[in-house]
Amino acid sequence: MLALAIALVIDDDRVAVARVTRALLLVPWGVPPVVNGLLWSFIFNAQYGYLNRTLLALGVVTEPVNWLGDARLAMGAVIVAYVWRTTPFNILLYHAGLRGIPRDYYEAAQMDGAAGWRVFWHVTLPLLRPIIAVSLILRTTFAFMVFDEIFAITQGGPGNATWVAAWYTYRTAFQPPFNVGLGAASAWVTALILAVAALLYARLAGRRLEATA
Amino acid sequence: MRRLSRGRRALLWAANLAAIAFLVLPLMPVVLGALQSEKALQADVRALLPRQLTLANFQLILSGGARRGPIFEQVSYLPKSVERFPAAFVNSVVVASSVALLTLLFGALSAYTVARLDLRWVKALVSLALVARLVPLIVLMVPLYVMFRTYGLLNSLTGVVAAEVGFLVPYAVLILAPYFASLPVELEDAARLDGCTRFGAFLRIVLPLATPGLAACATIMFILSWHELLIPLIVVSRPEAMTVPVILAGLVSDYFVFFTLMMAICLLGLAPTLALVLLLQKYVVRGLVAGALKG
């Protein structure tokens, strides 16, 4: 949803700054996932991190917050880091989708007296539906595989608050006690869950391929 | 197009600036951290901007830990990642370039098949490529490790390249197929009439026409390969064959590492792909969108 909002913001060519935003759009995508993890672990660091520095400077908090030490906050931190890195890709999809909507539709809607939100709700959103579906599915499956950020920020901790499926597989199979069988089994379970999503995606995107071929 | 009212223009400006802040602001700590000494960072835990800047972190890393300078003179412990960084950087360049080249080679050939030849199994195989793109890498790691151990590919850059190419080719096909399909068939037909073989037409007509698409694909593949942590992490345990992400991952469980040093390494690790993304943004955007929607 954040991605859709930004896509809408940058779509209007009449504002010069939109071009700058578009040029910078892929910056987070260009950051290697491990670096992204380390970067956010620095930002969230309780003693020296820049998040606490900023919040203290703004007077939002009076004491440094231990972001990664708290089980609930830690998961939030990982999510923020992951979302930041992966949002640009979705913005791109929505942007392409918005560009694909013919101008005539908007003009017709304006003729009929629709304005602002109503145009968005009744014209833009329905036409974007296939792209929203694709982006949701891709996003869900990729998020299932998030590994690098977990690895770099929390290592599954504190306690086991941020053990996700990929991390579980890695830890059981490739770190002591090297239980490869259990790791492989958990990998299979993950794969089966994702297979459902994958089939759905293949059907959606496959239909488009047939249309273009 | 109608002109915007002043209020809407201001609103859009504000929204765009917010978007830019969202995109770029999280990178600031890396820069600020990399440019100061750990002492300066710890001295004032509330300061946003460092009082004095230094390039000592970069000197240390780029010299592989040899040139310590005044800041690191007293430091008895340096993480191994610092020593290994220059070699790892070279490894990463080798791996990412080979991966980009090979995926382009295989990807272009199969994408052409998908776009032009009406073979019986093509459609099913494309769907398979779509599914393959969604298989989480971690699922493949156990069999990959066992297989590579049998073939003696562990601990070698060849192994890393082979695994990454295998994983990325389906994606390359998805990016290139729609691009090939959009090229005019007539040119190819004309070449065939003039006596070109199908492969000759592919080499002399299709590939030159598809240069922008190929560039997009190669860039994306290079970036994805540069970013890849899991494959080299599992395949390689010998220091000489490690890539940049693996080196960086080595810093994670190191509780004694300086944040400033860590951020400097991070900056060096992210610089190549960030530069690629900014320079070739137009191509990358086109490739990414094609690979996700039309493919």
Image (cartoon, rainbow, N blue to C red):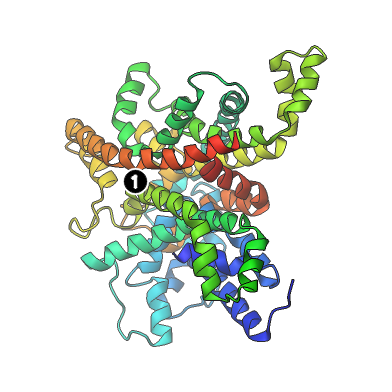
Vertical relation: B255 (above or below) B107: below
Q: From this viewpoint, is residue B233 visible?
A: no
Element class at badge 1: loop
Chain bearing mark 1: A
Vertical relation: B121 (above or below) A80: above
User: Which residue, given by chain and number where applicable, does mark 1 sit on?
Assistant: A145
| Mark 1 burial class by Cα count in 10 Å: few <14, some 14-19, many 20+ | many
Decide which of A75, A69 is in the foreground and name it: A75
Residue that extends furthest to the front in the rendered view of this protein: A112
Q: What residue sits 48% from the left and 37% below the top? A: A206
Looking at the picture, how far across and down is residue A75, in whole percent? 28, 62
Decide which of B228, A123 is in the foreground and name it: A123
Q: Is residue B283 left or right of residue A153?
A: right
Classify residue A154 by image quadrant.
bottom left
Q: What residue sits 69% from the left and 16% below the top? A: B199
Q: From this viewpoint, is residue B190 visible?
A: yes
Query: Mark 1: which amino acid?
Result: Met
Q: Is residue A46 left or right of residue A177?
A: right
Vertical relation: B185 (above or below) A112: above
Vertical relation: B18 (above or below) B230: below
Looking at the picture, how far across and down is residue B94, in whole percent? 56, 33
Decide which of A212, B294 is in the foreground and name it: A212
Looking at the picture, how far across and down is residue A45, in whole percent? 34, 68
Residue that extends furthest to the right in the rendered view of this protein: B194
- The image quadrant where one finds the N terminus of chain B is bottom right
Looking at the picture, how far across and down is residue A77, in whole percent? 33, 64
Decide which of B253, B125 is in the foreground and name it: B125
| Total numbered labels placed on residues in the image | 1
